[in-house]
Amino acid sequence: MREDDSNWFSRWEEELPSPEELMPLSQTLISPPLAMAFDIRNTSHQQFPHLSPPPSSNPLPSPGNLPQPSSAEFADSGELGSGTAGEEPARTLKRPRLVWTPQLHKRFVDAVAHLGIKNAVPKTIMQLMSVDGLTRENVASHLQKYRLYLKRMQGLSAGGGGVGGGAVSADPATDHLFASSPVPPHFLHPAAARSSSDHYLPFVPVPAIQQQLAVAAAAAASHPQFHRQVGHFGSPPNGHFEVPFLSRQSQNVQRMGAPVHNLLPGYAEDMESANASGGRKVLTLFPTGED
DNA sequence: CGTCAAATAT
DNA sequence: CATATTTGAC
């Protein structure tokens, strides 16, 4: 029947890992110098992924306001190899593969939804996301894929005919990541385009849980050849990760001319990415501000 | 800058 | 081998 535009988010929200189970990083990394020495000397440069989403509120600038791409500030904290060994290759060096986690993608979708398909361009989305380390290319790339996903879904929901209770449910194998994030109904409505910008406000009944986006860095390198391409997100079996997490909350690179109102509802960013590529360097984000 | 296609890594 | 993400070109 009709699509529920008030059920999609409530459902995906449940898929979020338990935010209360994460973070408690008691044991920081192994010896900083040791771990780092191990990491960086691998193949490339292994930096510490830091995601810096808004602390409490989501500083999503008004859609009608075009933020300025002022120079990004860099806040290299000492988290890097204990002070002395601090290297700063995070400037013009090649960044590791960015792993789009469901949470990150959620931010992406939210930004796009608030911007509207018309204003949903890489630059704007990137700035709206306010994710430290995220680059325009990252967003552009993902946006491309996201568009394809939407297109697929449109064709499916339109041509497939309204099967009973089916609703939109693409194959999980076709796109697991996208399927994990709720797709605003407006995205599939080319004719439902509002006059100017259609910003919808999804109400996320999220508790007062403020979770910083965290990323997992591959630490242990055991097997040189081992690939696991399985998405294990949705519900942490034990909330037990073997990778050290680093949650970094930099001051924030937000320099938009707008006072930034809370357009986005309270988010509950969680982390849950465990990359353990045998002997490979897999990171999620990079501590660098580039506009 | 934005988008599409191909390349590469996982 | 398929998918995800990156890189290059337009």
Image (cartoon, coloured by chain):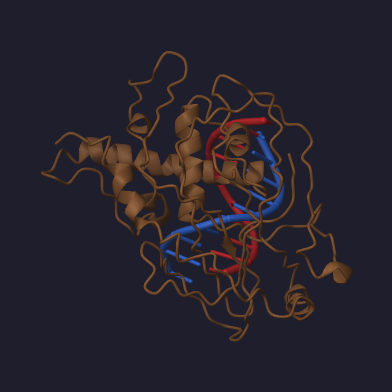
Chain colours: A brown, B red, C blue
What's the residue at 20%, 43% (across, down)? A167
State which quarter of the image contains the N terminus of chain A.
top left
Q: Which of the 4 image quadrants contains residue A251?
A: top right
- Residue A141 or residue A252, whichever sits in front: A252
Q: Position of residue A265 (x, y in %)?
A: 45, 36
Residue closest to the far front: A208
Answer left or right for A223 relative to A164: right
Q: Where is residue A34 in the image (x, y as percent from the top left)?
A: 77, 81
What's the residue at 75%, 64% (across, down)? A79
- Residue B10 or residue A63, whichever sits in front: A63
- Residue A167 or residue A161, whichever sits in front: A167
Q: Position of residue A129 (x, y in %)?
A: 58, 40
What's the residue at 67%, 61% (across, down)? A96
- Residue A79 or residue A178, whichever sits in front: A79
Residue closest to the far top: A195
Number of numbered markers: 0
State which quarter of the image contains the C terminus of chain A.
top right
Residue closest to the far bottom: A222
Q: Which of the 4 image quadrants contains residue A286?
A: bottom right
Answer left or right for A63 relative to A280: left
Residue closest to the far right: A84
